Image (cartoon, rainbow, N blue to C red):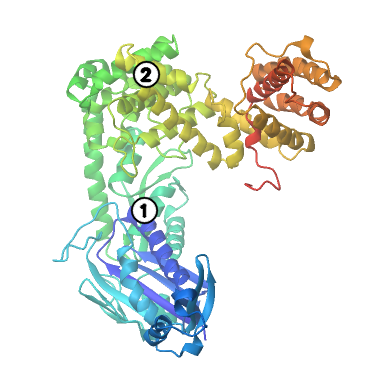
Amino acid sequence: MANKFLFELGTEEIPAWMIGPAMDQLEHSIEGVFRENDLDWTQLFAYSTPRRMSVVVEGLPQKRPDRFEVVSGPPKAVAFDESGQPTKAAEGFARKLGVNLGELEIEETGKGQYLSLRRQIEGEAVLDILKEALPGVIKSISWPKNMYWRESRFRFIRPLRWYVSLLNDEVIPFEFEGVKADRFTRGHRSLGHSEVAVKHVDDYVDLLRTEFVLVDPLERRLRINEGVRKASGGLTLVQDEGLLSTVVHLNEYPTVLRGEFDESYLDIPEEILTTVMRHHQKYFSLLDQNARLAPVFLTVLNTDKDSTGNIRQGHEKVLQARLEDASFFWVTDQKKSLEERVELLNQVLFQEQLGSYRDKTERLSKICSSLSDDLNLIVAARLCKADLTTEMVRELPELQGIMGGLYARNEGHGEAVWKAIYEHYQPIAFDDEVPATKTGVLLSIADRIDTIVGCFGIGIIPTGSSDPFALRRQAQGLVSILKQHRVAVPLGKLVEIAQDTLNSGQPNEKATAEVRAFLERRVRFLLQKDGVPYDIVNAVFANGIETVHDAFDRAEALQAMRGQPDFEALATAYKRIKNILTKQEIDSEGPKPELLAEEEELELYSAYEQLHPKVLEGIEKGDYLGALRAMAGIRGVVDRFFDKVLVMAEEAEIRNNRLSLLNGVSNVFLLIADISEIVQEGDQNG
């Protein structure tokens, strides 16, 4: 009979952003228990609210399948004497296992023949397996931050309050950290009961719904979306998937409430208003028919209604106070210009060894000067961090850069300057948009490469989960910008510019190599995220890369050629060329035509002479697909060469010349990629 299993872990409220990763770990750990014990299941449902994480599993068997084990004893030579009679060693082994000698048999092992017992082990009951495993499941969940509240010093994100552990209608008994598993869950903190019995696993979701707990995050999301639709009143919601995900995990019984604020606050830039509402209050913003911000907000309550209107009034008062502060900061900050604030950056520390933000802006100005002679870019580099000294950014750090751009625009700086400042922190998250303007692109590149090179130079390098300056995110953003805007500056050159600026021309070769490798790993990651197979990535990187967009162009061309018969055959031939050339000394002057005698090697030399300029022309034009097609065109010539010509001829001069010819062909191929890295159908390593 198939069984249903419920495990609910009850806690105090867990921070919303931690719930998703923790649920992934809980699912993985539960599934690990099943796999380790050879238990099949049909479906696993994962549920969570701020106060609980739970799984419901269907289709579990009654017990683990029976299995056999082999217990090895003494070697055959020790277990039996010369006449084949059992020795005391054999008798002792049988006695130890509680069996007759006749039940033992000889097993062939990697070490020889041994006296052994093959016995059947009856599978344990699923209830017993889970009873032993569930404490370990709880321990397996790790958190970015932890606390402890008992003498055992067990650390968890929040105090553990209850466990519901059922197999169908039967409690799976266990105790962990002073809390005993039972069938009692808890309803909504204010609308439900403090103790509710789950009689059967089938009752769980519906029972909690009657207790004003929507345990399925998808159900809460749908309820919020429907509430937003009804409360919008013809206005358009400012889409915010991150905020929606947050409020889903903040509430057990979400209800959408509409509030309003005074229209006079619309004189404040929209970026400020939406940030105040989103980051401080978790409010959604709405747009009117003209796509302008409306003096309306939507909030999600963890309750069923606001019958008196007191909750709405409370939220409106809190928001008014926030907006009043923002309005004050907006006016007050502009009493001092960004230029005046530049000197104040001397008191704002960037990093102890790398100096203040004033020092950083000086480095940015130098990097930008190396990238472009646009004076607007240099002005933007000088002013881009000045908003760190403003009250608005101190109160709302999420607005750094944005506020600098808005203040610069109000001061009369041209679009090239204020937009560069406004955009230079973009992208922040992985899927964010990159800067749109040329000056914004270059300033963002300069800012990121300065941070990365500076940190690597003083030994601040990401390790495991430790990345205090978010260098991985900085590098990923840098690579995305370089790719999307097809920036022509090679990665190595960028690193050198930042290194020279940081060290006044004194090279730090170790740091330069480390940064280059770090950035190339980010390029690899982005290629694979875009669906480029690992072997294509390896082929592109085998001979190094220059610009980021160039790496993507090469990968795209290789993918387009993959599977075409001539190219696949050529890749196979190229692997043969590469194998022959390995550990051979090659004449650096290239092949000598006068030493070519065989028809097929003359044909290959002629093809090589024609191919080389075509490939160089393709590279210059960025036509990698055309260059690869030209390569594929010599497939037949290469095949005939290997069919008819003995490369490793006895005469040294002839042998070396043929090796030099193959090396020349190989070098032409490497101008695009190392196609020997491409795994073909039938390859053992594919």
* Label 1: element kind: helix
In the figure, 489 relative to 532: above or below? Answer: above
Mark 2–mark 1 Cα distance, whole angstroms, equals 38 Å
Looking at the picture, which amino acid does disc 1 mark?
A: Thr
**Above or below for 420 versus 53:** above
Give residue 383's position: percent from left, percent from top: 30, 18
Percent x, y of residue 632: 76, 29
Image quarter of residue 527 = top right
Camera-side residue of 186 and 108: 108
Q: Is residue 321 above or below residue 233?
A: above
Residue 155: percent from left, percent from top: 22, 60
- Looking at this view, name the residue that lies furthest to the left: 151
Question: Which of the 4 image quadrants contains residue 323?
Answer: top left
Judge left or right: residue 325 versus residue 92: left
* Residue 207 seen by the camera: no
Residues 553 and 101: in front is 101
- Using the image, tell me which numbered label, if any, was put on residue 246: 1
Residue 552 seen by the camera: yes
Residue sitting at x 44%, y 14% = 371
Q: Which mark is residue 498?
A: 2
Label 2 vs 1, first from the N-terminus: 1
